[in-house]
Image (tube, rainbow, N blue to C red):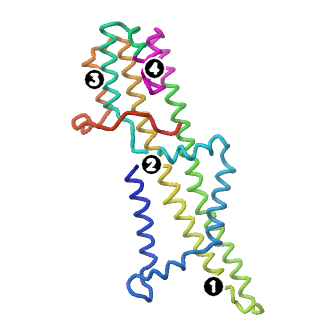
């Protein structure tokens, strides 16, 4: 489980709820005040309209990936550059000893489709420039798909506050209608509550739900792209006949100094939504 995401979101909710309870008549904290912030009409307007606009803005093929996106956000098994570097050094040793064709078996055993494709490109004796072009194009297109997924949550984050304002306008209109003398003004309070609470709901939905998910997806994309760039550089160096020791030193420049020294024990795997 992604503990930082869970702590951040739950912590923000708790802090907000505690803030809502401050200053009541029951003492320092008044739990009874929380009911003042619950308004079914506001929830219906903000959440309902935001979800519908997101649905209207993206094709079914993108919407069906939402469960996958949430799985990526909650998954703690990130990409491990050091494990990939170790694999590439091992491949370099095999290639120097037995030739590039000996990598075919290693490629067939590789679980990562991108890693396997890169190995097979040099096993098939493709031109170095052509092989690099294919690999880099794969990386660019994969990153574009990931960005499109994150963009869906950006859309939700941008429209939620707008529908909070829509709810505010609805509440104000009802409030003004309730101010008619003939009606006795009996609906003034609930209408005003809807007018104010919808703005709150819109901000919460945008900045506590959609925003963090989009940021998490982009972070995972950056991690995956780094590992893919390491694979490309490593595979091209193997094709050029680089020394395994020199290859390790070269690839270690892609990772932070603290990672080189301390090591990252997480398992390797590409988990950004693709």
Q: Earlier in the sequence, mark 4 or mark 2?
A: 2
Task: Identify the residue under disc 1.
Answer: 189
Task: Identify the residue under disc 2.
Answer: 74
Image side of residue 164 versus residue 30, left or right: right
| Magenta span: chief secondary structure | helix
* Residue 248: numbered disc: 3
Depth check: 231 or 38 in front? 38
Q: Is residue 116 magenta?
A: yes
Give the SS element for disc 2: helix
Q: Earlier in the sequence, mark 3 or mark 4?
A: 4
Q: Which residues are magenta?
A: 106-135
Q: Is residue 111 magenta?
A: yes
Using the image, determine if residue 270 lies above or below residue 131. Answer: below
Circle 2 Cα neighbour tier, 10 Å, few/some/many (<14 / 14–19 / ≥20): some
Image side of residue 16 versus residue 54, left or right: left
Task: Identify the residue under disc 4.
Answer: 118
- Quarter of the image where one finds residue 233: top left
């Amino acid at each position: 489980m992604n503990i930082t995401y869970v702590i951040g979101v739950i912590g923000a909710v708790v802090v907000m709820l505690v803030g809502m309870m401050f200053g009541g008549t029951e003492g320092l904290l008044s739990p009874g005040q929380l009911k003042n912030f619950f308004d079914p009409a506001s929830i219906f307007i903000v959440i309902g309209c935001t979800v519908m606009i997101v649905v209207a803005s993206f094709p079914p093929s993108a919407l069906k990936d939402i469960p996958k996106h949430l799985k990526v956000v909650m998954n703690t098994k990130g990409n491990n550059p050091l494990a990939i570097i170790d694999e590439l050094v091992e491949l370099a040793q095999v290639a120097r000893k037995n030739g590039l064709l000996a990598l075919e078996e290693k490629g067939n055993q590789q679980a990562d489709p991108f890693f396997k494709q890169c190995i097979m490109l040099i096993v098939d004796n493709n031109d170095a420039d052509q092989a690099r072009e294919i690999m880099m194009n794969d990386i660019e297109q994969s990153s574009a798909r990931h960005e499109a997924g994150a963009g869906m949550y950006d859309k939700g984050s941008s429209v939620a506050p707008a529908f909070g304002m829509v709810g505010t306008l609805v509440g104000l209109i009802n409030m003004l209608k309730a101010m008619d003398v003939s009606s006795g003004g009996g609906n003034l309070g609930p209408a005003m509550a809807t007018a104010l609470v919808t703005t709150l709901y819109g901000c919460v939905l945008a900045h506590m739900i959609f925003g963090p998910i989009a940021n998490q997806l982009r972070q995972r994309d950056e991690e995956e792209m780094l590992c893919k760039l390491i694979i490309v550089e490593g595979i091209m160096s193997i094709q050029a006949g680089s020394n395994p020791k020199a290859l390790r030193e070269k690839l270690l420049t892609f990772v932070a100094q603290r990672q080189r020294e301390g090591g990252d024990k997480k398992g390797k795997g590409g988990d950004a939504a693709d």
